Image (cartoon, coloured by chain):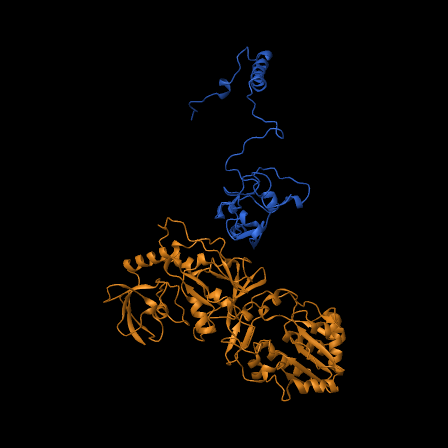
Chain colours: A blue, B orange
Amino acid sequence: MATINVINVMKKHQFAWYEKFYFYSISKGLVITLKHFIKAAFLRGSVTVQYPEEKRAYSSRFRGMHSLKRDEQGRERCTACFCCMWICPADAITIEAAEVPPERQHLHPEDKYSKRFDIDLLRCIFCGLCEEACPKGAIYLDGGGEMAADNRDDLILTKERMTQKVGGPIKGQRN
Amino acid sequence: MVTIKIDGVEYKVDEKKNLIDAVKAVGTDIPYFCYHPSLSIVGMCRMCLIEIEGNPKVQAACNTPVKEGLSIITKSKRVLESREGTMEFLLANHPLDCPVCDKAGECDLQDNAFSAGKGVSRFEFEKRNVPQEEIGDNLMINHNRCIVCFRCVRFEEELVKESNLGLFQRGYHSLIGLANDKTIKHNYQGALSDICPTGALLNHKTLFKSRVWWYKTAKSICHGCSTGCNIETNVRDNKMYRYMTRENAELGMYFLCDKGRFDLDWLNENRLFAYYEKGLPSESGAVIPKILDKIKSSKKIAIIGGAHESNENLALIKAQAEKLGKDIVFEARTSKPQYFLPEQADFLMTTDAHPNTKGTFDQAFNSTGGIDSIVKDFNAGKIDLLFILKEDIPAELKGPGSIVVLHTNITASVKDAEFAVPIKTFAEQSGTFTNKNGIKQHFELAIQPLQGLPSSGDFFKRLNLELSMKKEELAIGNN
């Protein structure tokens, strides 16, 4: 049985005589390089950024470092309900709750607060379940993705490091 | 037994019970807050509304007598709607601060709001905000969470027989508060917070320690006194956090006193995990051979204490100790109240702080002469080896013989005794206690014990085993 409709693929891609000529092809390639060079160097069309100095904006859904939020009046939103600690699949969160002492009363909307709130970044898998479990909108994984450190202690996020510091240091704390 | 109709189906129920309990027994739940089987009925919460055939209005179930021919409807649209209404009213001023509240997870208000509530509130005004108060040395009241069910006041007046709390003002302004200037000091502050259907009454000792849903529970018996209240142990991370009452309608056990409820630090702290010799930590390999030598050379051995041990342990101790082949005298009564019939300190607690005194009588763990004659014999040198089971060393004891203390905690007696042996607590094993009325009650293992920690019975078993073994066998550690 004879083969019908045979298409010779090689024939389609055969070079014309001028294409076989070395300098034609090389200059065609160089034009593309030159185009990109002009775009990047003069027209600010580069794809890469100068990383440590320049940073790209993260997506709004990016899950990075944790932060504890404050409400409009500057009070801590977290009331130590232990929901995040309970849901955490990696057991990264440690909370110690206490009754709010009178001198901190202006910092908390309720009478219970987290005396200690540690997140072990070495354990955290950045799944975002704590964010979802929080009934008060207190914890968000909206920080950056850079958290390298040269010792393990620096990878324990304490409350002081996490709490939103809009408007200076944490109120009620002397420093 | 009478026949009543529930939602059109006829059931035979006990007419001595309250309608809520009678209906629950045949499988229909009516939500309630203020009703409690051992308290009087006030019908204050209006949550248990039902329709009664031949009655134009919805009625409170708790206040309806069970009688022949009664026909009630518990699930009609009208009933559900009125319960929704009640729930909406109760929640109008409730702060809904469940994330902060310690009761969340075991809260009747939460449960009923989910099962019978509407889910939304039409209350759009500022909620009432009354600051919380300290009303006892271990009790505080959060007025915002209170739904004025009157349970606490009734409990105090009817069972504790003290009137510290009262209901003040009316309607929207109702407040539960102290009736006089003195704060509450009685033994039932834990029970008050337990009986509260919301998080209005809370204890300082358990405040903010943990959340309810973290606890692993086990059925247990209170270790505090000879009443033997049924409890549920709440354990988290292998640490005892609290005891809760386990309701036992047959025995009428609904409460727990503070002495039993809050006496649990000894299970977690200051535990004895090492064998001690002359007040210093040692190890079993060094201590047990010395005890064995003492046993071999002794004329008469006494074992005192044991009312803290389970019946199973007592039986094992008795059997193993008699196998030692020495003259042995047992005495479990180390404190005075154990010699008399149980006396009530208040409506629950007895003066005898041992959970299993009755059990020791059943096991013949008592001598005829009592503790005094044993002390006399020991001082005179007639008894030269004394085992003490989780008790203090009697003050008059000054004899030349040796004392071996079996204890769960590092106490003065452990330091003073010649030898001390660590044993399991009641929470680290299962067994039975016989309470003052002779009722044998089972308790379950709640805390995983440290590996290798013997119970008191196991210790005597090991003594016998090593006594029967030859030296070579012991050397290879074949035990």
In-image side of B287 versus B105 (left or right): right
Q: Can you say which quadrant of the picture contains the C terminus of chain B?
A: bottom right
Q: Which residue sits at x=41%, y=51%? A: B127
Q: Can you say which quadrant of the picture contains the N terminus of chain B?
A: bottom left
Q: Find residue A56 and report its horizontal and vertical position in percent.
A: 56, 30
Q: Residue furthest bottom?
A: B368
Q: Is residue A91 visible?
A: no
Q: Using the image, determine if residue A22 lies above or below residue B254.
A: above
Q: Find residue B150 and report its horizontal and vertical position in percent.
A: 41, 65
In-image side of B320 versus B3 (left or right): right
Q: Which residue sits at x=45%, y=58%? A: B143
In-image side of B305 versus A89 (left or right): right
Quarter location, residue B411: bottom right
Of the pair B25 and A76, the residue shown nearer to us: A76
Quarter location, residue B271: bottom right
Q: Find residue B151 and report its horizontal and vertical position in percent.
A: 42, 67
